[in-house]
Amino acid sequence: MGSLSVLGSALGAVWWLIPLALIAGALKTPRFKGLVGEAWVKVVAWFRLPSGTYHALHNVTVRTPDGTTQIDHVFVSRFGLFVVETKHMRGWIFGGERQPKWTQKIYRKTVLFQNPLRQNYKHVKALEALLDLPEDAIHSVVVFTGDCRFKTPMPANVARGGGYVRYIRSFKTPVLSDAQVRETIAAIESGRLAPTRATHRQHVAHLKARSNPNAERCCPRCGSEMVLRTVKRGTNVGKRFWGCSTFPTCRTRQDIE
């Protein structure tokens, strides 16, 4: 009994470490980091983008021909529609507008990640398909939050911290009427999926299916079947990718992550 008593006392003294360890693990997940970045963007927008001028919609999930796409933030105004992709990262960030992969460096650790401009391009196209708006009224914006620094020149629509607000507010010429603003907000609200856990799980399942080289998929642009192809020349020779079966009529392609 003595040894059991000692063991019980020891467990009683450290039991609180278990939930702390679980919380610490959750804080390090990409999902939590993403939520932190999105929340930061919301707070900055609340203070610096007047709600009477810029109408905010967050966590917008819409259907696409190959599943769904999830948009962090949309700001609708008479100056256009601003589609915002958030990246909560730290370290040094290297990348170019046309590079398929960007680089994150934290001391000696190097991580490649998808060019967020390419990622947001799909979001923009999904909204173009949903809305009756001219292409030049929809703007792609990428904002990096967290303790990161750009080590290469970035396009004007890629910003750190509150810089995304300055970019949005740099558009001063009205391109939409008040009626079009109201219609656009109503169309997004009616076309989006409910922002629930079930919607998020479904979206994650679609992402996993798209990364599966054996899964069937449709072209996000024309709806035709996508087929696996192999690069036959150039620096990426031998690399496989998804291409539209109607090529060259439709030249849509998707890299295999």
Image (cartoon, rainbow, N blue to C red):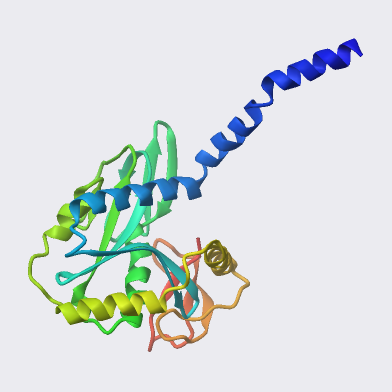
Q: Left or right: 38 with respect to 194?
A: left
Tell me residue 122's x, y (percent).
Answer: 37, 70
Q: Residue at x 7, y 70 (%)?
A: 173
Front-lying residue, 232 or 56: 56
- Compared with 165, 89 (above or below) is above
Tell me residue 76's x, y (percent).
Answer: 24, 69
Tell me residue 176's x, y (percent).
Answer: 15, 77
Q: Left or right: 143 with respect to 257?
A: left
Residue at far front of view: 52
Q: Residue at x 36, y 69 (%)?
A: 123
- Compared with 236, 4 (above or below) is above
Tell me residue 119's x, y (percent).
Answer: 38, 63
Q: How many numbered circles are shown?
A: 0
- Compared with 212, 167 (above or below) is above
Residue at far right of view: 1
Q: Residue at x 50, y 39 (%)?
A: 27
Using the rendered image of the protein, determine whether residue 227 is visible from the camera's viewpoint: yes
Using the rendered image of the protein, determine whether residue 232 is visible from the camera's viewpoint: no
Residue at far top of view: 2
Could you tell me which quadrant the N terminus lies in? top right
